[in-house]
Image: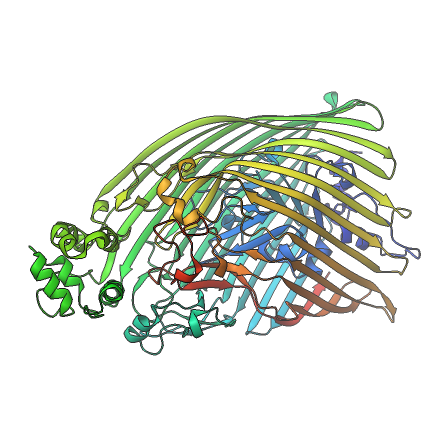
C-alpha cells in the first residue's frame, strides 16, 4: 500500500513510522498497553536523504524526539545543546549573531559575509546562516544532529555538521493542541495548533505562538538617553501553516508558509575584567560608568549588571514559503522529490558599542544597522533501490542576495575619551605632560608647528589647540550588497555487496559565483580629524618621535578614517569544488554494525562585509578563500540486551584547511584563513530502556582534541594580523572543550485513576574552554554543568498535562563569549614577547566584556490536546 493511503488513515502524518521520532518517541509509541520492558524499535532518520534505521546509517547522528525535546525544554537551536555532546551554540551582540559549533568547529556569526560551518536545515530547506535558523521552531517532530562533513547530500557550508529539523506535519485526523506557560522574569507564553482534513486529499496544520520574558540583565543607563533598565528580554511570535496534498496514490505535496518576528532588547555585555581606562570612563559618565576594577586589575566576580547609555533594540523578521513534492515512479521502484523554497530574513539593530555609561559610540535602530538574506532554492532528487543497490541522484541550485548596512555614531564623550587615552600614554613616558580631555585639538589645528604642538600638549590643550574633534552624531553609513548563485550535481549510492557488507559512494560538484558591491561613506564631516592629524604628521613626529604612527592611527580607526570617504568596493569570483564520501559498513551480527568512512567537505569563499584596514590603509580586497576539510571516521553501532540498550561510538579525525576565522580585534571583525585546524576525538551515545516500566536513560560523551597547526605571519593573507593571532599556533581552538557529556533520565507511567505522572532531568557538562577567537587568557570559561528538569502529571489519554519545569536549575554562572572592549586598553604588544608571542600578561591593559549565559528560569505549563 502506498504511503499516501497510510497518511489518510493514521492519527498523524508523522506517526506513519511510529518510531520516526527518535529515542523517546519510541517509548511514547509503545506506551499503550505494553506490560513488559520497552525495546528499541526502528529509529528512523533522514541523514542520507532517505528514511533509514539509525543503526543502519554509518554516520554519527544524534536523533532527538518530540518528547525528548519537550522534556528538556528545547524551543530553539540554542536550547538544543543541552542534549548534544560536542555541540555549543552562542550569541553575541544580538540574537541575530548566533553561532553553532560541532566538535569545536564553527563560524562566528557576527558577519553575514561568512556562511556557517554547521548547516541548518528546517523541513528540507537549507538556511545559509545560523542566525537565520535561530528562533521559535514551533511544534517539533524531531531533530537530527549530524556530526562531521555532510557536503555530499546537504551541500556546501556543512563542513562541521548539520542540524536537521523536522516540524510536526498535518494529519487527516482532526486535532487541537494548546499550551499556556508562566514563569519567572515575568515570562509568559501561549501557543496552539489545529490540524485535520479539508477533504479526502488535503489536510492542514496551523500553528501560532507568542512568548515574552523580561530581561535577566540589570542595566545602569549612565548618561542616557536609554530608558530600558533591563536587557536580554524575549518577545517573539511565530505563525506556520501547512498543507498536505495527496492527489493520488503515487504522489504527495507539502506546502509550508511561516512568519516570525522578534522585537527585543539584546545583548549588553558586562565587564569581566576592568582595566586602567576605568578612571576616564568614570569621569565622563553619570555614576561609575562600568564595573569598578578589582585589585590589581584582576578578574571580576560574576555579575548580571551591565552598563549601556544607548538602546540595544533588535527587530528580526523571518518569512518563507516551501513546497516539497514526492512522486513514486513504480516502474523504476524510485521516488522523484522536488523541494522549492523562498525565504526572506531581515534584522534591524541598535547597539551601545562601548557598553559603558559614558556616551562614547553607538548604533541606532533606524534601519541603517543590520542585514538581510533573501534566497531561492531548488532541489531535485531521484532515489530508488533494488536488491543490490540504493541509488540517488540530485541537482541543487540557489540564488542568494545579502544586504548589510552599517552605521556608526560618535557620542559626546568620544573626543574627550580619546584625548584621555592619548594624553595618558604620553604622560606615562613624560609625566610633565598632563592627562587631559582637551588635547585632540592640538593634533588637528591647521598648520600646527612643533613648538605649538609641544606647548599645546604641555598645557593640556589650553594653548595652541583649537582644532576640530570628532563630529557628534552619525559618522559613517556603509552598504554592502553580495549576490551569489550556486549549482550542484550530486549522487549517493549504497552497494549491498553481501547481506552483511555495504559500500557507500557519494560525490558532489558545486559551482559557486559571488559578487560584492559596497559603498563606504563618511557622513557629517567624519574623517576630518583623521585628515587634519595626518596633515600635521611632521610637527607631531618632531615631538613624539617613534610613537607617532600609533598615535596617528587612533585618529584614523576604521570608523573615523578619511580614506573611506565615498569609497566603492566591487569584487566578483567564481570557483568549483568536488566533495564526497566513501563508507564501508559491515554487520558482525544483527545487533552490531561497524563502519569506516572518509568525507571531504567544502565551505564557500566569500567577502568580509566590514571596514578592514592594515595600519590606516583600507584593504584593497575583502575576499577570503574557501575552507575544506578531510574527515576520517571509524565507528560501531550496537543494539543490545534484547533491543533495550543502544550503544554507539565513533572515532573521528578531521583536518580543516584555510579555516575561516572571524575575529574581533577591538576595532573591527577580521577574517583570516588559518592554514590548518585539526579536530580528533571520540563521540559516544547510549540509550537504555530499563526493566522498570516507563524509565529510560539517554546520554552521550564527546572527547575532542581540536588544535590549530603551527603557522607564521607569512602564512596569513594579511601578515599584519599575526600579532593579534599569535596565541593560536599549536594551541587548542576556542569553544572546543576537551570533554563534554550529556545525560538525561525520563520516567513516565500510569498511576491509576486515569492519570499519568512522570519526571525528567537533562544535564550537560562542559570542560573548560576559551571563548575568544584570539585565545586571550581572560576569555577562558571554567568547566560547568547545566541541569534542566520537569515534573509532569496529566490524564492517561494525554488530553491534559500540567508540568512544573526549570532550566539551569543550579543557576550555573557562565559566559557565552568574551571580547575586547573597544578602545579600552590593549592586550597584544607591537613586538615579540619573551614567550614567543605578542602577548604579555604583565602588560595587558585590556578591559574584557562578556555576553552571559542565561540564569535559572522556572515556571509551569498547561497543555491540552484533542
Extreme residue toward the right, this view: 36
Residue closer to the observer: 111 or 205: 111
How far across and how far down the image is residue 700, in percent? 73, 52
Position of 344 compared to 85: left or right?
left
Q: Is residue 289 above or below residue 486?
A: below
Position of 177 compared to 25: left or right?
left
User: Where is the C terminus found, in terms of image quarters?
Assistant: bottom right
User: Where is the N terminus found, in terms of image quarters?
Assistant: top right
How far across and how far down the image is residue 23, in percent? 77, 50
How far across and how far down the image is residue 268, in percent? 43, 65
**Residue at the image position 37 percent from the left and 47 percent from the top:** 404
Residue 492 seen: no
Position of 398 compared to 653: left or right?
left
> In this figure, what is the number of numbered marks?
0
Q: Is residue 625 above or below residue 186?
A: above
Residue closer to the observer: 166 or 16: 166
How far across and how far down the image is residue 762, in percent? 71, 61
**Residue at the image position 67 percent from the left and 59 percent from the top:** 764
Extreme residue toward the front, this view: 834
**Residue at the image position 32 percent from the left and 74 percent from the top:** 282
Position of 314 compared to 437: left or right?
right
Residue 336 seen: yes
Amino acid at each position: 500500500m502506498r504511503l499516501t493511503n497510510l497518511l489518510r488513515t493514521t492519527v498523524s502524518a508523522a506517526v506513519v513510522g511510529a518510531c520516526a521520532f527518535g529515542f523517546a518517541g519510541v517509548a511514547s509509541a509503545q506506551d499503550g498497553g505494553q506490560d513488559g520492558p520497552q525495546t528499541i524499535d526502528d529509529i528512523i532518520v533522514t541523514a542520507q536523504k532517505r528514511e533509514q534505521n539509525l543503526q543502519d546509517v554509518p554516520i554519527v547522528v544524534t536523533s532527538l524526539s518530540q518528547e525528548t525535546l519537550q522534556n528538556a525544554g528545547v524551543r530553539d537551536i540554542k536550547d538544543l545543546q543541552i542534549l548534544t555532546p560536542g555541540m555549543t551554540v552562542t550569541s553575541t551582540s544580538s540574537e541575530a549573531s548566533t553561532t553553532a559549533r560541532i566538535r569545536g568547529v564553527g563560524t562566528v556569526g557576527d558577519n553575514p559575509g561568512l556562511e556557517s560551518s554547521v548547516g541548518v536545515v528546517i523541513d528540507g530547506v537549507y538556511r545559509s546562516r545560523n542566525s537565520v535558523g535561530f528562533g521559535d521552531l514551533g511544534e517539533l517532530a524531531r531533530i537530527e544532529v549530524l556530526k562531521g562533513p555532510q557536503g555530499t547530500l546537504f551541500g556546501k557550508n556543512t563542513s562541521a555538521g548539520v542540524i536537521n529539523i523536522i516540524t510536526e506535519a498535518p494529519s487527516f485526523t482532526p486535532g487541537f493542541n494548546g499550551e499556556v506557560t508562566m514563569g519567572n522574569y515575568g515570562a509568559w507564553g501561549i501557543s496552539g495548533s489545529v490540524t485535520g482534513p479539508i477533504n479526502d486529499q488535503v489536510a492542514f496544520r496551523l500553528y501560532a505562538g507568542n512568548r515574552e520574558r523580561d530581561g535577566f540583565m540589570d542595566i545602569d543607563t549612565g548618561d542616557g538617553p536609554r530608558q530600558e533598565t533591563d536587557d536580554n528580554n524575549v518577545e517573539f511570535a511565530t505563525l506556520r501553516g501547512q498543507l498536505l496534498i495527496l492527489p493520488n496514490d503515487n504522489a504527495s505535496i507539502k506546502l509550508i508558509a511561516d512568519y516570525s518576528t522578534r522585537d527585543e532588547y539584546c545583548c549588553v555585555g558586562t565587564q569581566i575584567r576592568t582595566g586602567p581606562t576605568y578612571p576616564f570612563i568614570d569621569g565622563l559618565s553619570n555614576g561609575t560608568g562600568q564595573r569598578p576594577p578589582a585589585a590589581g586589575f584582576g578578574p571580576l566576580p560574576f555579575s548580571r549588571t551591565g552598563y549601556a547609555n544607548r538602546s540595544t533594540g533588535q527587530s528580526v523578521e523571518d518569512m518563507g514559503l516551501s513546497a516539497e513534492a514526492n512522486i513514486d515512479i513504480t516502474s523504476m521502484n524510485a521516488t522523484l522529490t522536488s523541494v522549492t523554497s523562498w525565504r526572506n530574513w531581515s534584522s534591524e539593530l541598535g547597539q551601545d558599542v562601548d557598553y559603558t555609561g559614558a556616551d562614547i559610540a553607538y548604533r541606532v535602530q533606524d534601519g541603517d544597522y543590520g542585514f538581510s538574506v533573501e534566497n531561492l532554492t531548488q532541489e531535485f532528487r531521484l532515489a530508488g533501490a533494488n536488491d543490490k543497490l540504493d541509488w540517488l541522484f540530485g541537482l541543487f541550485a540557489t540564488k542568494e542576495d545579502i544586504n548589510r548596512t552599517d552605521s556608526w555614531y560618535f557620542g559626546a564623550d568620544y573626543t574627550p575619551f580619546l584625548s584621555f587615552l592619548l594624553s595618558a600614554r604620553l604622560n606615562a613616558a613624560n609625566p610633565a605632560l598632563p592627562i587631559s580631555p582637551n588635547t585632540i585639538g592640538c593634533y588637528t589645528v591647521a598648520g600646527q608647528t612643533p613648538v605649538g604642538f609641544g606647548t599645546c600638549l604641555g598645557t593640556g590643550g589650553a594653548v595652541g589647540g583649537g582644532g576640530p574633534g570628532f563630529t557628534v552624531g552619525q559618522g559613517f553609513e556603509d552598504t554592502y550588497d553580495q549576490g551569489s548563485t550556486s549549482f550542484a550535481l550530486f549522487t549517493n549510492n549504497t552497494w549491498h555487496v553481501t547481506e552483511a557488507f555495504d559500500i557507500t559512494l557519494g560525490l558532489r560538484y558545486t559551482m559557486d559565483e559571488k559578487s560584492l558591491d559596497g559603498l563606504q561613506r563618511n557622513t557629517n564631516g567624519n574623517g576630518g580629524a583623521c585628515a587634519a592629524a595626518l596633515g600635521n604628521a611632521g610637527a607631531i613626529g618632531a615631538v613624539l618621535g617613534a610613537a607617532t604612527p600609533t598615535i596617528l592611527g587612533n585618529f584614523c580607526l576604521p570608523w573615523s578614517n578619511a580614506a573611506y570617504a565615498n569609497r566603492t568596493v566591487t569584487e566578483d569570483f567564481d570557483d568549483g569544488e568536488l566533495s564526497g564520501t566513501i563508507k564501508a559498513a559491515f554487520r558482525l551480527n544483527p545487533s552490531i554494525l561497524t563502519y569506516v568512512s572518509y568525507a571531504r567537505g567544502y565551505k564557500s569563499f566569500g567577502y568580509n562585509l566590514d571596514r578592514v584596514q592594515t595600519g590606516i590603509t583600507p584593504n584593497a580586497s575583502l575576499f577570503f578563500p574557501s575552507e575544506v576539510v578531510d574527515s576520517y571516521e571509524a565507528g560501531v553501532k550496537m543494539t543490545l540486551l534484547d533491543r533495550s540498550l543502544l550503544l554507539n561510538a565513533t572515532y573521528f579525525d578531521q583536518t580543516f584547511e584555510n579555516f575561516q576565522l572571524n575575529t574581533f580585534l577591538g576595532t573591527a571583525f577580521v577574517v583570516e584563513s588559518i592554514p590548518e585546524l585539526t579536530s580528533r576525538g571520540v563521540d559516544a551515545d547510549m540509550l537504555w530502556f530499563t526493566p522498570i516500566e516507563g524509565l529510560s536513560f539517554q546520554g552521550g560523551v564527546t572527547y575532542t582534541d581540536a588544535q590549530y597547526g603551527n603557522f607564521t605571519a607569512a602564512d596569513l593573507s594579511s601578515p599584519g594580523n599575526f600579532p593579534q593571532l599569535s596565541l593560536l599556533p599549536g594551541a587548542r581552538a576556542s569553544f572546543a572543550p576537551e570533554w563534554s557529556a550529556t545525560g538525561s533520565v525520563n520516567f513516565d507511567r500510569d498511576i491509576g485513576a486515569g492519570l499519568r505522572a512522570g519526571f525528567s532531568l537533562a544535564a550537560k557538562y562542559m570542560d573548560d574552554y576559551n571563548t575568544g577567537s584570539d585565545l586571550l587568557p581572560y576569555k577562558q570559561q571554567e568547566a560547568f554543568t547545566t541541569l534542566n528538569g520537569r515534573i509532569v502529571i496529566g490524564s492517561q489519554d494525554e488530553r491534559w498535562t500540567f508540568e512544573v519545569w526549570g532550566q539551569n536549575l543550579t543557576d550555573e554562572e557562565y559566559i557565552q563569549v568574551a571580547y575586547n572592549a573597544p578602545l579600552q586598553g590593549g592586550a597584544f604588544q607591537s613586538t615579540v614577547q619573551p614567550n614567543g608571542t605578542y602577548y604579555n600578561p604583565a602588560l595587558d591593559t585590556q578591559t574584557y566584556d562578556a555576553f552571559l549565559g542565561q540564569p535559572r528560569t522556572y515556571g509551569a505549563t498547561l497543555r491540552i490536546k484533542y
